[in-house]
Amino acid sequence: MSQVISVRDIQEMIRSGQGVNIPADAIVTPSARELLQDIETNGARAIATGNTTAPVSADKLSPPTKKLNSKSPKSELDAFFNSPYAHSLKEQICEMGHRLWKRAYVDGNGGNMAIRVGEDIAICTPTLVSKGSLKPSDMCLVDFEGKQLCGTKPRTSEILMHLQMMKSQPKAFATCHCHPPYATAFAVAGIAPPTCMLPEYEVFCSVGVAPYRTPGSADMGKFVAELTDQYNTILMANHGVVTWSHNNIEEAYWRMEIIEAYCRTIVVAGQLGKPINTFTGPQMKELLNIKQSLGFVDPRFGMKECELCDSGDWRPGATCQAPQGGEPAVGLDPEAEAAVKAITDQILAQIK
């Protein structure tokens, strides 16, 4: 089996003084390949002493102590953009881009990501570059109006949406947009997936639906941004999905995996011909308590247990029964019940 050479392997070769010797049949990761190019340009000694933008382990890095913004001197912005800390963020974006591409969540040059790195500045992906071939040198630095401050390639055409999300939601540290097929199918239908079926989805995702607007337009960003105070996973009608995280870009990516797996699961479950089991109110309350403790957002915080798994979109006419001894219980809407029965009868007739 061929040996896989990573950035860490190359750095260890340099520190040990043995020189950089790559076996002919070795598999070199994209980040390691870029480091080798840096070594050719700057020499191994410069890499070892940290005098270049060579990758450094992210867990050993800290953000700059001086807070930067769009008004910071160009020299300071350039220094930050070429710092080991910024390089580690660029590598993280590249890694997530490669995962998106391998999972077929993006096609062509689709998808984009951004990470907030200052008061009103962010590192983002470039336009017209496949996420499967992203390199740290492709990244861009922009201000919150979309003006590019650093980087040789033009920034993504959809950056305004990411920036409007960050403006609207101060907690949004990283954002990720792509087109996972099953979740995008729900976006095309203009409906959020039904809830109360899988714990991972309930804890990590809270899903809203934004109306369609032309990709890259200010209106598209506006309608998405308006949902970020209550939702961290937003279906963009007839377009795709965008997520945000207050922790890191990988968590924003995780939400893509989770919502796509969830949408695929419920589509398959709906074809089995059996009623789908859902959580009880108390079970759902426990999951929301976990979610709240993790600092995630959800519009259902504070709702009564009996309301948590009632969905008007999927169970027309369902209402929350008042507890015994309280106000009179509200019954189901007779017209809605009749409509549901008629639809159910049609489906059963087709099956027979």
Image (cartoon, rainbow, N blue to C red):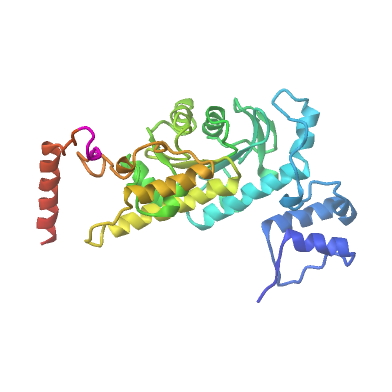
Q: Where is residue 164 in the image (x, y as percent from the top left)?
A: 53, 29
Residue 126 is left or right of residue 197, and the answer is right
Residue farthest to the top, as pictured: 71
The quadrant where residue 348 appears: bottom left
Query: Is 87 in the magenta?
Result: no
Tell me, yes or no, if residue 129 can be seen here.
Answer: yes
The quadrant where residue 224 appears: top left
Where, quadrant-wise, is the C terminus in this rendering?
bottom left
Total residue callouts:
0
Q: Where is residue 46 in the image (x, y as percent from the top left)?
A: 88, 51
Residue 143 is left or right of residue 46, and the answer is left
Q: Which residue is drawn at 28% across and 43% down?
A: 310
Q: Residue at x 37, y 48 (%)?
A: 284
Residue farthest to the front, as pictured: 325
Residue 229 is left or right of residue 27, and the answer is left
Q: What residue span does the magenta drawing correspond to?
A: 319-327
Query: Is 322 in the magenta?
Result: yes
Instruction: Please state which of residues 263 and 310 is positioned toward the viewer in this rendering.
Output: 310
Tell me, yes or no, if residue 105 can be seen here.
Answer: no
Instruction: Please state which of residues 167 and 38 is positioned toward the viewer in this rendering.
Output: 167
The secondary structure making up most of the magenta span is loop
Q: Does residue 335 sit above or below 59 in this rendering?
A: above
Q: Which residue is drawn at 71% across and 47% down?
A: 88
Q: Position of residue 154 (x, y in %)?
A: 63, 36
Where, quadrant-wise, is the N terminus in this rendering?
bottom right
Instruction: Please state which of residues 111 and 122 is positioned toward the viewer in this rendering.
Output: 122
Q: Which residue is drawn at 15% across and 37% down?
A: 333
Instruction: Please state which of residues 239 and 121 is positioned toward the viewer in this rendering.
Output: 121
The quadrant where residue 32 appears: bottom right
